[in-house]
Image (cartoon, rainbow, N blue to C red):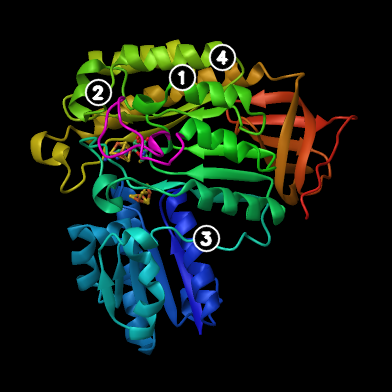
Amino acid sequence: MRAHLVTYGCQMNEYDTHAIRSELAGIGYSFVDSYKDADLVLVNTCAVRGKPVEKAQTLLGELRKEKHRRGNLTIGLIGCLAQLPEGQRMGKRFGVDIMLGPGAITEIVPAIQRGKFQSFEFINELRFYSPPAPADSVSAHLTIMRGCNHRCTYCVVPTTRGPEVSRPAEDIINEARALAGAGVVEATLLGQNVNSYGLAAGTGSRRARIPGYPSFAELLRMVGRVGIPRVRFVTSHPINFDDEIIEAIADTPAVCRYIHLPVQSGSDRVLKRMAREYTREFYLDRVRRIRELLPDAVLSTDVITGFPGETDEDFEETLSLYREVRYDMCYMFVYSEREGTPAASHFEDMRRDVKVRRLSRLADLSKEISLERNLRWIGRRVEVLIQDTSEEEGLVLGHTRGNHVAAVEANLEAGIHNVVVAHATPNRLYCVEDPKDAVIDSTP
Ligand code: SAH
Ligand code: SF4
Ligand code: F3S
């Protein structure tokens, strides 16, 4: 029995695929790189924007042909797209056998055994796997919560992933210990809004705590003590990014000083229409506090250009906020209208060329500021995690604690190394070996 797994979307989906892989291995599956050699193909999908949906559709088209050609192929459409009417229509159209939403992926083994199955439930008590620590990796993901209670008007995630559920801290710590024991040197705590970890139902900045759960700040300190040299987390929602979290990062050496704080827009008018729950001023105050306590922190963000009704003035405010914050990195997206979202029902999509032109202006600004930020590191010692030791023109690639891509001119083993930055571009730090380099062994 051979399976081929395809993953689109974010790190939560990668984590889910990893968990599915170990479930399948448990019932005797091996894995192949091409669907042509597989008996089972699972497409773990993303629906956050039009592009990943199109990719899934193209692949399902190819799979349908393959199935017609040889008959013995089971096709599964799983993950976020499967949870939406759009995906369920697609599944029918392409004759898929298995459809599971992200809340039901724990049903994967019974689904395969039945051959035909679908479930879109959110199976709470089974929401978290503890997949075995990856045997061959120095980095690992660790889910701490699932779902999202916010209602950003452009976003499908609250529908696809359901309401927030925090994982018990004990399970998280046990999994972190297992990762440390397996030689993992970097763990990324995952959730759509990790800052609302341990908070009871609702949204906003004043949510009650679930009895018996630590706050996210406390959890960071706890995971920071387990012995994994690098602990990171994604993603943060500014509304719950409180001072205690910033203090926990400052006090906990294992926690990387890399903060991804999606802003989406710099205009209050647009933020309101997006239902982001904060103002520009609130956001800038969070950044001020980060800069005070963590002057070296690397800051990145997400921005959407061309949200319905965004005027030239609104967009200028995004650029001015960007200049004020001086982000190290930015993930930028052209607004993509998603069926079933409040924005799609209430607002009119704008011309694509306007959205794209704004994105390209933001890209120019971001490139300029990233270069300025990266040049500051020249001559400084940085810690690089090398995962892949294959050399590309005499360089090995890794990433710093601040999540910069680092290209090191040296023949280094996998693991953590101290190197010195010699040169920088907007998206890379070029480093050379540090004579004082101390390798932290990544094997148990
Ligand atoms: N929970 C995370 C983000 C999840 S989606 C958070 O709130 O930060 C990742 C990013 O995709 C978002 O931050 C947003 O910038 C972008 N995105 C989400 N929906 C989108 C849409 N309909 N069109 C364009 N970009 C979108
Ligand atoms: Fe989507 Fe907003 Fe939730 Fe992030 S916080 S997942 S953007 S609804
Ligand atoms: Fe996509 Fe689902 Fe992640 S929609 S971004 S895979 S939560």
Relative to 183, residue 195 above or below: above
**Side (left or right) of 85 relative to 293:** left
Residue that protrudes farthest toward the front in the picture: 212
| Mark 2 residue type | Leu
Which SS class for mark 3? loop
**Of the residues under marks 1 and 4, which one precedes in the sequence?**
1
Tell me which corner region of the image, top left, top right, bottom left or bottom right, holds residue 430: top right
Q: Nearer the viewer, mark 2 or mark 4?
A: 4
Label 2 close to label 3 by CB (< 8 Å): no
Q: Nearer the viewer, mark 2 or mark 1?
A: 1
- Gap in Å between the C-alphas at discs 2 and 4? 26 Å
Is-magenta flag for residue 331? no
Residue 201 is inside the magenta segment? yes
Circle 1 crowding by C-alpha within 10 Å: few under 14, some 14–19, many from 20: some
- Residue located beneath label 4 in the image: 293
Q: Is residue 113 visible?
A: yes
Q: Amino acid at mark 3?
A: Ser
**Helix, strand or loop status at disc 4:** helix
Q: Is mark 1 within 8 Å of ligand 1?
A: no
Say whether residue 171 is left or right of residue 69.
right
Give percent across and percent down for residue 70. 38, 88
Alpha-carbon distance for marks 3 and 4? Answer: 34 Å
The range drawn in magenta is 195-215
Q: Amino acid at mark 4?
A: Leu
Of the two numbered discs 1 and 4 in the rendering, the one whose residue sits closer to the viewer? 1
Residue at x-position 35% and y-position 76%: 75
Q: Amino acid at mark 1?
A: Asp
- Residue 263 in view in this figure: no
Q: State which quadrant residue 107 falls in.
A: bottom left
Q: What mark, if any, has residue 271 been given in the picture? A: 2
